[in-house]
Image: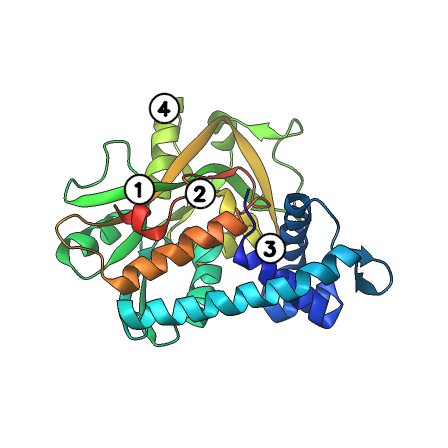
Amino acid sequence: MAVTLQQLLYFVAVADVRSFTRAADVSGVAQPTLSRALRTLETELGAPLFDRGATVTLTPAGEAVLPLARRMLADADTARSTVAEIAGVRRGRVRIGATPSLCIGVLADVLRVFHQQHPGIHVELTEAGSQPLVDGLVRGSLDIALVIVPPDGVDPALHTAPLLRERLSVASPSSRRPLATRGSITVGELARHHLVMPARGYDLREVTLRAYAAAGVEPRIAVEGAQMDAVLRLVEAGTGMAVVPDLVFAGRPRLRRTVLNPALYRTVAVARRTDIAPPPAVIAFADTLVGHLADDPVQSAGDVQVLHRRRTGRELLG
């Protein structure tokens, strides 16, 4: 794995403040994310860059790398500014769609970085189920969307590129006893519990209903029609269980994750219309998205696999 600019940004931040915690705050990331990136950087360079004592200090290797890192970051900023002027991404608009779980688990951090890199671009975010997002792309009300690939494929009018493969698990309140002592649960066993069901149009609803039908059981629905954040809050409150993607468990200690057996997976894809060339602002967003997943591949979020990690945004969009 090659050295990335994000790793160098984290390295310079720690070198400036001499604290991993403060550097993470300055960088706007969780400390485990920053520490993991720096460990990867040290492995790639073949030497430790910090003495991690009571006070963080640079090693001789760190002292040697620091001015080089500063120069590389400065050169990257110059290159970005120059290309932005040419490509026209200092101004403009990008209309992005994503499912609620992806807004929670991926897009929040991506859009923060994108806004920092391109503050002049106006972002319009639509949060909806995959089918409404596909409809929005076809109608032209969205430029790009993160959608769930259904069993019968996506509309042929759209170009899609797989981005993530994520597992679906059962969410239950951590305040209650575990659903299964062996660490996994079947759909038949889950059918004994009440469910919180997302609104119509969300793939999670359809996936859950198909899994129940395949197991030959009927769901016991306590509440239906909720958006993702409401689903999670209802589960935390003990209203019922829910089948949700592993991405949403990060940062929610009041939720317990139980794996389904057999496991359920879904594929997340980036989609756009095939008959319209992506404008520079859309390509810039795709670059930020790919770069974020390459540097922080949501390793702490359960079983989530990043697909095509080494592609550029332009390559991803076809």
Q: Which mark is residue 291?
A: none
**Mark-to-mark CA distance, 3 and 2:** 24 Å
Left or right position of 18 against 172: right
Q: Is residue 196 above or below residue 86?
A: above
Q: CA distance from mark 1 to mark 2?
A: 12 Å
Image side of residue 99 versus residue 250, left or right:
left
Q: Is residue 216 visible?
A: no
- Amino acid carrying mark 1 in the image: Ala
**In percent of the image, x 57 and y 44: which residue is there?**
299
Q: Nearer the viewer, residue 281 or 178?
A: 281
Pick whichever of labels 1 and 3 is earlier in the sequence. 1
| Vertical arrangement, residue 16 with respect to residue 50, above or below | below
Instruction: Spot the residue most to the right.
Output: 54
Q: Residue at x 50, y 53 (%)?
A: 232
Nearer to us of marks 1 and 2 is 2
Residue corresponding to mark 2? 309
Q: Nearer the viewer, residue 167 or 38?
A: 38
Q: Earlier in the sequence, mark 3 or mark 2?
A: 3
Considering the numbered disc 1 on the image, is that residue within a helix, a strand or a loop?
strand
From the top left corner, tell me how far across and down residue 207 is, in percent.
36, 36
Dot 4: element = helix
Q: Residue at x 30, y 51 (%)?
A: 314
Residue underneath mark 4: 214
How far apart are the alpha carbons under marks 1 and 3? 28 Å
Question: In the rendered image, which residue does mark 3 sit on?
Answer: 251
